[in-house]
Amino acid sequence: MDRLWRPVRVYSHNRGRFHHLVFVLRALLWLTAALFAWGHMDDGLVWVAVLCLAVLGAIFWQKLHILEITNQVLIVIDLILISVAIRISGGLASPVYIVYGGEAVFLTAYGTLRYSAAGVVALILAYGLATDGWDTRTFWWRVTILGLYLLAAGGLGYEYRRTRSRSRENYLVLQQLSRLRTLQDSIVEERDIDVVLTRLLAEARETTHAKIAYLVRLDDRGRIQRVVTNGITLPETLDYSQLQAPSAFQVLGDQDEGAWADPVCQQLWQSGMRTLALMPLRQEEILYGWMGLATDRSPSALNSQELIIRSLADVMSTQMKFYASQMVAAKRGQLLTILERVSRIVNRNLDMEQLLRSLREAVAQVLEIDSFFVVLTLPDDSSHAFMQYLWDDGVEYPSEVIDLDPQGLTGRVIVSGEPLLLGEGVNEGKLTGSNKAPRGMIFVPLAHEGRVLGAMSVQSYRIEYDPEHVEFLSVIAAQASVAIRNAQMYQQSQEIALTDHLTELGNSRRFDMALQSTIEVAEELQQPLALLLIDSDSLKIINDRFGHRAGDLHLQRLAEVIRDNIREDDRAFRYAGDEFVVILPKTDIVDAIHVGERIRHELEVRPCVWRETFILRSTISVGAAAWRPGMTADSLFQAADRAMYEAKKAGKNRVAQA
């Protein structure tokens, strides 16, 4: 369990190295100023300052919070020290003013545009007082250039920290889902539902960092059966009859006075809790209870944990439904055994393909099936559906988008949310494989929290099915729906972590994985492979003239041009900043250069408007490299990188070959 949270410590460790690096860079900056001032009158002051900085470093090196504050406070001291060095080494004639540029590093690390603007003002005052050059053009040219550096540094630093924060949040979500998957594996063999719910409740409290967690269980008539708590002991005399179940996920703050009226909430309030998250534990239309998580922090602390709370609630409600199913199916021993086996399978997989394959194998242990498929709905497209998994007559077929007829068999099940049992003689629809006429068919909906996710079907060319088979498959589908939804959320979280938010292209992490796998395929099949490295020639000019929003528009436009000029099998990524890469499988260097030229030409001629102003003639420099047997992913990338820099040196707006 401790290993699951190692990434949090990794982030803390990296942040500490970051503050150390800033401090070391400052020491080098001060030392540079001292060397420039060496031999001039009063240079001892600068050397004393360097010595004081070394003492501060020795004291606060291991105290990261103090070191972070010290790094920010010393920005003001930097300006004073550099100005003193300028003053004693020649004033306006002194080259020490260049060292002011080092402040851009610290503003990138800690500043925003507002602080950068304040830094520009401070720079002008400091340099003016040090040189008395207020009435010279040289003075104003220098402070203008340095001021632009500081403003750019503050803006870029702010955007970098925002992006890093979002990446960290997405990474932590993946870790939480991974931890949830491990927990599911650990409880799947547990027979005692009370033990399972107690462990899940403790996990919910720990994962969300709540102070108190509780769970209300309902019986099959909707009456309160039991209240399980973690972090608080409720009085035995407490009247639970006044508790009201939430209809959906909600977070209550201390301003929602009426919502804290029931006896449990009153106990939480008296314990100092001021935020309460409530989550119903529901499967289909059956409410099994609800979970509450309380904290003394602001509502945002629990609002930000909605995804993991829902995932935990899904697991809890799945376990409670499974327990209820066990009780109902106690008289059907063999069916109960199979349901347990299926529960283990669906709760173990977050990979969609493996999940559905395991689901088909589990169903096949009870039912004679010759065909099995799972169709999932598509968001905002009711006329099509996604055939996620199709197995027919012993063969697995690729996933594909299909037409969804509301009057067809699958469409009727998805629209109505009701299962369908059909016998021999029904000729509606044909599967991809054998195209034999089935003797028996069952279609059941896949529903999650009242929403139909799709449909699952089994078919046989040999036997007909009966209502007991439908009941069995419906129970399987109810459990599979939760696992399918968890797999979808897991895929979505992975997609977020591997996608650049600005251009919606893959990021550098996805590029590294894609390039390695593409090289392996090219090596195995002895096929050509090429790589384009694209760097914008215009981003800095656009940023300086129109602002960073216009620069973002330029990057989005460049990404769009790249997408429009590559094949379906080609893959484009935003590698970093204004650098893009395109992987071109089955492509030699000549064709790769043609692709690069096509992208370069279209970007140059395609108009772009920013606030009614034309941004004309945006250009790029492109490096093209071809893979040769024995080349690694890194060496191929380095070859394209060298070619791109050759294009830059040759005058930009061109394609160069490695």
Image (cartoon, rainbow, N blue to C red):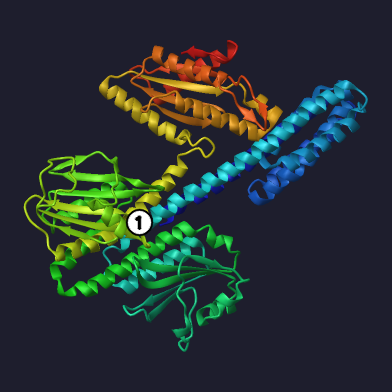
Q: Residue at x 54, y 21 (%)?
A: 603
Q: Nearer the viewer, residue 322 or 392?
A: 392
Q: In this orientation, which residue lies closer to the viewer: 563 or 533?
A: 563
Single out the residue that lies furthest toward the left.
462
| Residue plotted at (58% across, 77% down) | 258
Residue 542 at least partly seen: yes
Provide the residue designation for mark 1: 182
Question: Please, is residue 547 above or below residue 186 in the view?
Answer: above
Residue 84 location (% of width, % of height): 86, 32
| Horizontal relation, residue 464 to residue 327: left or right | left
Q: Quadrant of residue 447?
A: bottom left
Which quadrant does the N terminus fall into?
A: bottom left
Q: Secondary structure at mark 1?
A: helix
Q: Residue furthest top?
A: 650
* 127 sits to left or right of 400: right
From the viewer's perspective, tell me whether residue 167 is left or right of residue 31: left
Amino acid carrying mark 1 in the image: Thr
Q: Could you classify mark 1 by the number of other residues whose Cα lies within 10 Å: few (under 14), some (14-19), or many (20 or more)?
A: some
* Foreground residue among 589 and 213: 589
Above-or-below relation of 597 to 427: above
Residue situated furthest bottom in the rendering? 237
Residue 83 position in % (x across, y down): 84, 32
- Residue 117 location (% of width, % of height): 77, 38
Asked which quadrant contains residue 625, the reply is top left
Left/right placement of residue 43 relative to residue 22 reads right
